Image: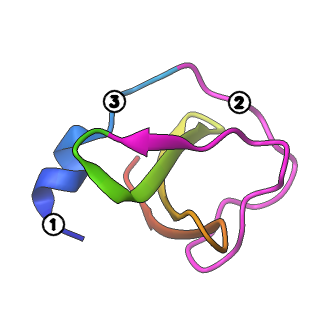
Amino acid sequence: IPNAVINSVPRDRSVVVREHVVVGEPLPPTVQLRPVPRYTEYRYAVVNDRRVIVEPRTRRIVRILD
């Protein structure tokens, strides 16, 4: 993932989920994915106070930022 993508992910209000937030695992369908500004191939969410970058088709976490 390019650094420009990582730097484009804002710190929004976090949602809380019971599932573990782990790279390679999908986010629950209840978590709203938001587009990464200027990088439409990625989505992000702020889950359990951690910013995560997600592959939108599978909802799998590809990177945890915080």
Is 17 colored magenta in this rendering? yes
x 77%, y 34%: residue: 16
Is 57 colored magenta in this rendering? no
Q: Is 26 on the left-hand or right-hand side of 10?
A: right
Front-most of 18 and 11?
Answer: 11
The number of discs equals: 3
Q: Amino acid at mark 3?
A: Pro
Q: Is 49 on the left-hand or right-hand side of 37?
A: right
Q: Is 54 on the left-hand or right-hand side of 59?
A: left
**Number of residues whose C-alpha sits closer than 10 Å to that of mark 2, classed few (under 14), some (14–19) or many (20 or more):** some
Please give the residue where the numbered disc 1 appears in the rendered image: 2
How many angstroms separate mark 3 from mark 2 (CA)?
14 Å
12 shown above or below 63: above
Q: Amino acid at mark 2?
A: Val
| Secondary element at tag 3 | loop
The magenta segment is: 13-36
**Number of residues whose C-alpha sits closer than 10 Å to that of mark 3, classed few (under 14), some (14–19) or many (20 or more):** few
Please give the residue where the numbered disc 2 appears in the rendered image: 15
Front-most of 23 and 26?
Answer: 26
Please give the residue where the numbered disc 3 appears in the rendered image: 10
Q: Amino acid at mark 1?
A: Pro
| Secondary element at tag 1 | loop
Q: Quadrant of residue 1?
A: bottom left
Residue 32 visible: yes
How many angstroms separate mark 2 from mark 1 (CA)?
25 Å
x 39%, y 26%: residue: 11
| Secondary element at tag 2 | loop
Q: Quadrant of residue 49?
A: top right
